[in-house]
Amino acid sequence: MTYETILFEPKNGVAWVTLNRPEKLNAVTSKMITELKDVFDVIEADASLRVLCLTGSGRAFCPGQDLNDRMGGGDSRPDLGETVETGWNPLMRRLYKLSVPTLAAVNGVAAGAGANLALACDIVVALDTAKFVQVYANLGLIPDAGGSYILPKLVGLARARELCMTARPVMAEEAVEMGMIAYSKPESEFILFVTETVERMAEQPTFGLVSTRYALNQSYSNDLDSQLDLERDVMQKCGFSDDYAEGVKAFLEKRQPVFKGR
């Protein structure tokens, strides 16, 4: 399948999706959002695809919205609320609820909505020279693409305020230290580590991984009793899955399980 602004390569159970506007550092346009939503549909419909790996082409991951894409002529001011409502919000809802686990391979700068696109993924691996920037303060805006939702949960409210109100760049290693991302890797290890990680995830019980994401995300809004009830309900569903049956059978037979993602 061919797209104009992204690359899509299904391989070994992994849906490799690359933001592909390197001449613009992969800045997001309305066309790219449409194509990302379309490729999410493809992933959802293909049971052989068990994990999404999202990365960028060239020297950047994504600097966020392409400002030229939404500017009118003269002194006209675009309705940014409409841009968020019709573009970013539907995209982020899809990504957070995708039926496969997700990994962002951040190969360079991730700024604004580009940073928040990465942080929405279940696991974030960054090149050690990559940096994350909540650039909105420089434009008189607030974090969008779910940034005001996810960042305080990852780094705490005090740190989130500092990052969002100063637009201070955060290098990958510091991002790991503050709990923003999972891994920082040097260039010599980055691609191999990402590939091994997503291919391993593609062999794991997909429904169980996505159910884990759901349970962890719900913990932020649930009280203890509600969370315990959720664990009961989700555990029940996982217990009826084919992958759970295979996991138990493999354990009893002292062999490696062969999960099918169901």
Image: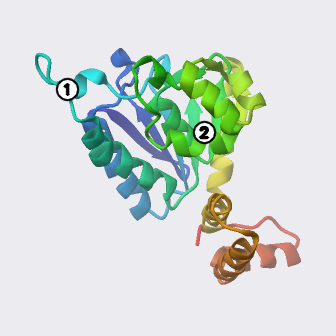
Q: What residue type is labelled 1?
A: Arg
Q: Residue 77, which numbered label?
A: 1
Please determine whether, in this image, residue 148 is positioned above or below residue 24.
Answer: below
* Local SS, label 2: helix
The three-letter code of the residue at mark 2 reads Leu
Relative to 52, is 73 on the left or the right?
left
Does the rendering let one see residue 117? Answer: yes
Q: In which quarter of the image is the C terminus?
A: bottom right
x, y percentage for residue 216? 68, 59
**Dot 1: few (<14), some (14–19), or many (≥20) neighbours within 10 Å?**
few
Q: Can residue 103 be seen in this view?
A: no
Residue 154 position, x and y percent, is 67, 41
Q: In which quarter of the image is residue 244?
A: bottom right
Camera-nearest residue between 35 and 69:
69
Callout 1: SS: loop
Above/below status of 70 relative to 217 = above
- Which residue is disc 2 drawn over? 151
Q: Residue at x 23, y 35 (%)?
A: 79
